Amino acid sequence: MALRPGTPADYAVFARLFLELGVREPPPSPEVWAAELMPLTQFHDGPQGPVAYVAADVLGDLGYVVQLVVDGAAQRQGLGRRMMQEVAAHFRARGCTRWGLNVKRDNTAALALYGSFGMKPLREAVSLTVSRAQVAALPAAPESLQVVPVVESEWAPLTAAFQMMPEKLARFSKRASHQLLRLHQPGALEPMRLGMMDLRQGGVLFPFFAATPGHARALLEDAFRRSGVEALHVAVTDDAPLAEVLRAAGAAVVMETLQLQGLLAS
């Protein structure tokens, strides 16, 4: 099948298809699309125009499927499978040995598709909508805790501390719509494990990691100050106790997702 690179003229189609993801945040702005997503995106054109797109990135030896969307009217025709086959070839040609993506836990059709390519669940995340009042109900943050920007020398130790995808922080650090921030406490024995977040446009926090609910409060309060939004959308990864604390404070669960990974067949 033929996939073609995205162009600025594709933004309207991208924004329409983006809604098929069923996520809380709106489509990225045309400026963010052109600068950050368009270079990663390829479209499949049907007789009446584009009916699907896939955004794919290479992170070291890992091929990451950022988004794969098929128009509702074109689903259940094998298009998603054929696009995955094309993406796999794209990754292999660039030296990737593994690939992965994130998918909603309740998307059984997608889970079956990705499972047929050898992908298996590796991590899980709970996305919640959190208000200022709910943050105020969390345990107090430890004294002397500060939120500071992540610098280049910290990309690797933070990636190792929280078992993130390789080169993900390096990629996001160069995007204007992202702010990489971490917790700092003088004299901390494991400073890279205190917590970190990627604050995105619209108050989306993904990834988000915190050593304790008090550490989470420090990050969330800082995110509110920087973003000015009325509610944050926080993706808590592999931390059921923190997700439960946020739920107990009144935060609403928006969705649950799984990170899948698998080997790229030769």
Image: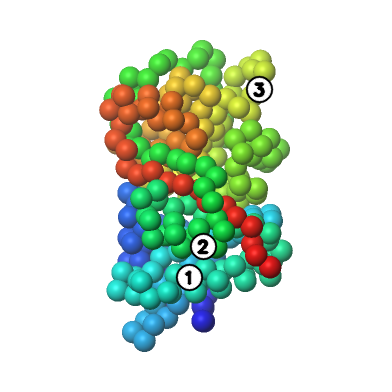
Please state if 95 lies on the left or on the right of 10 as rendered.
right
Please state if 152 lies on the left or on the right of 110 as rendered.
right
Contact, mark 2 vs mark 1 (Cβ under 8 Å):
yes
Badge 3 element: loop
Q: Quadrant of residue 91?
A: bottom right
| Residue 43 position within the rendered picture, expressed as x and y whole percent measured from the top left | 46, 74
Task: Point out the frontmost of discs 2 and 1.
Answer: 2
Q: Which of the marked residues, 1 or 3, is nearer the chain's N terminus?
A: 1
Residue 81, labelled with which disc?
A: 1
Q: Is residue 100 visible?
A: no
Judge whether 40 appears above or below 120 on screen: below
Q: Amino acid at mark 3?
A: Glu
Q: Quadrant of residue 60?
A: bottom right
Badge 2 element: helix
Judge whether 230 appears above or below 36 on screen: above
- At 32% across and 60% down in the image, what residue appears? 19
| Residue 16 position within the rendered picture, expressed as x and y whole percent measured from the top left | 32, 66
Q: Which of the marked residues, 2 or 1, is nearer the chain's N terminus?
A: 1
Q: Is residue 172 visible?
A: yes
Residue 116, labelled with which disc?
A: 2
Q: Report which residue position mark 3 lands on.
A: 190
- At 50% across and 58% down in the image, what residue appears? 115
Label 1 Cα crowd, 10 Å radius (few <14 / some 14-19 / many 20+): some
Judge whether 149 appears above or below 214 on screen: below
Task: Point out the frontmost of discs 1 and 3.
Answer: 1
| Residue 122 position within the rendered picture, expressed as x and y whole percent measured from the top left | 55, 45
- At 40% across and 39% down in the image, what residue appears? 126
Badge 1 element: helix
